Each structure stands twice: as C-alpha cells, then as structure tokens.
Amino acid sequence: DAGVIQSPRHEVTEMGQEVTLRCKPISGHNSLFWYRQTMMRGLELLIYFNNNVPIDDSGMPEDRFSAKMPNASFSTLKIQPSEPRDSAVYFCASRIGSDTQYFGPGTRLTVL
Amino acid sequence: DAKTTQPPSMDCAEGRAANLPCNHSTISGNEYVYWYRQIHSQGPQYIIHGLKNNETNEMASLIITEDRKSSTLILPHATLRDTAVYYCIVRSPSGTYKYIFGTGTRLKVLA
C-alpha cells in the first residue's frame, strides 16, 4: 500500500517567492495533518483537517501560511511570501478515525 | 495529554537488545502510550502503542508498568538501521488529536 505522498521532496526558493507543498494522504484516511520540524522548535503541528474541513489551524505561524484540502485525496500548504525563517522540513500525516497517524517523507524547504 | 520524559541519548551494541525508557507519571486511565521513531531526514515512523498490557509486533515490544507511570520500548536485536530518534507520546484516542513530540531519545547503535 502506498503511504502518505508528499511533493516536492526538496524545494529551494528565494525570499518573497510563493511556495506550494503538496500532500496525498493514505487512501481511506479522513484526517490530515501538516507539521513543521526545525532544530530549534522540533516537530510542531500547523493545521489539522477532518473530512476535508480545517478543524484547528492555531499552529499556523502567520497569515503568510495557508492550507487547503479540496478533496479527500489532496492537500496543499502554501507560503506567500516565503521568508528565510520558513526554512524547515514540512511533514504531512494522515489517519482514519482516531487511529494512529502515519507520516509522509517530508519536504525540505530552503528559503534563501 | 500527559507529559513524557525520556533520556536524551543512548548507545547500544549491534545485535543486543535496546531498552528505551519513558516516564509518564501523570498519565490518565484512558491514555495510550505511543512510540515513533525518526531516522535521519525521514518522516516519523509508527512503531507500537499500548494501553496497559504489554504489546509486541514485528518491530518491537512495549512493556508498560503496572501503575502505568512508565514504559520501555524494546528492540530485541538492534541493527545499525535502528539508529534514530525515538519518541514516546501519550494521548487519549477520544481526546486531543495532537501528538506532542518532545525531544525524544537519540539511539545510536554501534557496530
């Protein structure tokens, strides 16, 4: 079975540019999570969707970050405009019901 | 969700059992103990979880003390590929969906 799929795996961009990260959850899972990992702050939850609806976005750093889930098999995390402090590894995770979360391989974002 | 405490680092000889402790003294009756690991540059990988009984799967065993205030993850025959950061998380299935990842234990398996 395919796990959580994320693209791109690596992204290098310049400050001020728009960045879009993509996630395909495991088929049949109805919850999706976006996390960010940095050396300073560890793994942090950014936003949580349940049945395609954002339930908790309290972890989104600021208005430059937005996330969408137009259907059960696709989600995006957008940063506009990007800043060097956004450099991190971004993980997507999914689960079914209240079960275990399964993580994707991550997108390593570097903002120059 | 209850807070967990783990040693920052441990070493283990290849082929030996790796025993990773976790303290969760404030755990509630309906909270499960979950273990994940993160191999360098990869996403966190689910290992095992349990409520109060000991659990075993193809990856590891989980031993939870009778009072549930602590647990130990056991990798029975550690290999170099088990070198990773191991996270112990406590959560209630019916409660918050948030996983609080602490700093974990950095396990280094030595050849």
Image (cartoon, rainbow, N blue to C red):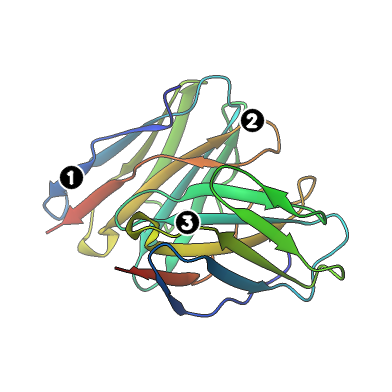
Image quadrant holding the N terminus of chain A, namely top left
Specify whether A33 is left or right of B4. left
Q: Is residue B10 visible?
A: yes
**Residue beneath disc 2:** A96
Q: CA distance from mark 3 to mark 1?
A: 24 Å
At mark 1, the secondary structure is strand
Label 2 Cα crowd, 10 Å radius (few <14 / some 14-19 / many 20+): some
Total tally of numbered discs in the picture? 3
Which residue type carries mark 1? Glu
> How far across and how far down the image is residue B109, in percent?
37, 68
Q: Which mark is residue B43?
A: none
At mark 3, the secondary structure is strand
Which residue type carries mark 2? Ile
Relative to the observer, which residue lies in front, A97 or A65? A97
> How far across and how far down the image is residue A60, in percent?
47, 53
Q: Are marks 1 and 2 in contact (CB under 8 Å)?
A: no
What chain does badge 2 belong to? A
Please state which of the two labelled residues, at mark 3 or mark 1, is closer to the viewer. 3
Q: CA distance from mark 1 to mark 2?
A: 29 Å
**Residue beneath disc 3:** B37
> How far across and how far down the image is residue B105, in percent?
48, 72
What chain does badge 1 belong to? A
Q: Is residue A81 visible?
A: no
Relative to the observer, which residue lies in front, B87 or A41? B87
Relative to the observer, which residue lies in front, A83 or A87? A87
Label 3 Cα crowd, 10 Å radius (few <14 / some 14-19 / many 20+): many
Q: Are marks 2 and 3 in contact (CB under 8 Å)?
A: no
Q: Which mark is residue A11?
A: 1
Residue found 65% across the figure and 67% down from its top: B72
